[in-house]
Image: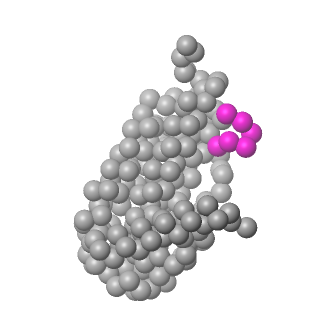
Amino acid sequence: MTSPEVQAEYDRMYAYYQAQGERYSFAELWPRATQARLELLNALQEVSDEAAGWSPGSDDWSIKEVALHILNNSRSTRGVVRALAAGRPGDTSGIEPPRQTTTASMDQLRAELRDDGIEWAAAILELPPRPPLTPTARHSMFGELHARAWYLFQRTHDLDHKGQIEQVKTAAGYPGREVR
């Protein structure tokens, strides 16, 4: 069961996604989405493989786990956006990828996230600038979202997980962090 406070936040985000997505074309939304990805990439700069594999606790995700989650989610979300913009149903089964470990290096993950951001930018060139607001696809927290609302979702997803990465980097015991 969702608390009233959390539900109010979900409702606020739903209204944001819907209203902004209805108002703006993909090209007009692109700077916000790109800025979020750049901020995410900046948060990952100079994170070593050792630091990226470290976790503050057994229930906390490592930076590598977060980076892989973002990458997998981003690829799935792009597929949903493409399908909805083409008037087809969107498959949301990969939108909330589970916690997963990886042997990929941080250099590889950074490169894949960068390349994924470039693919997002290129994807809007093949989409109608303002696709119809139907069909929609269901997000587990925010409800039915149209193509441009899903596009904005990826922006906030990147920013939310950037915050998670920053929390890991400031946690006690984070490798390489200076003790003062």
Quarter the C terminus occupies: top right
Residue 5 location (% of width, % of height):
61, 61
Colour scheme: one colour
Residue 3 location (% of width, % of height):
68, 63
Residue 44 location (% of width, % of height):
45, 37
Q: Image quarter for residue 177?
A: top right
* Magenta segment includes 11: no
Residue at image point 73% right, 67% down: 1
Q: Image quarter for residue 19?
A: bottom left
Q: Is residue 86 visible?
A: no
Residue 176 location (% of width, % of height):
55, 21
* Stretch in magenta: 56-61
Residue extending farthest to the front is 4
Residue at image point 45% right, 71% down: 15
Q: Is residue 107 above or below residue 120?
A: above
Residue at image point 44% right, 60% down: 154
Q: Which of 70 and 126 is in front in this view?
A: 70
Q: Is residue 52 above or below residue 79?
A: above
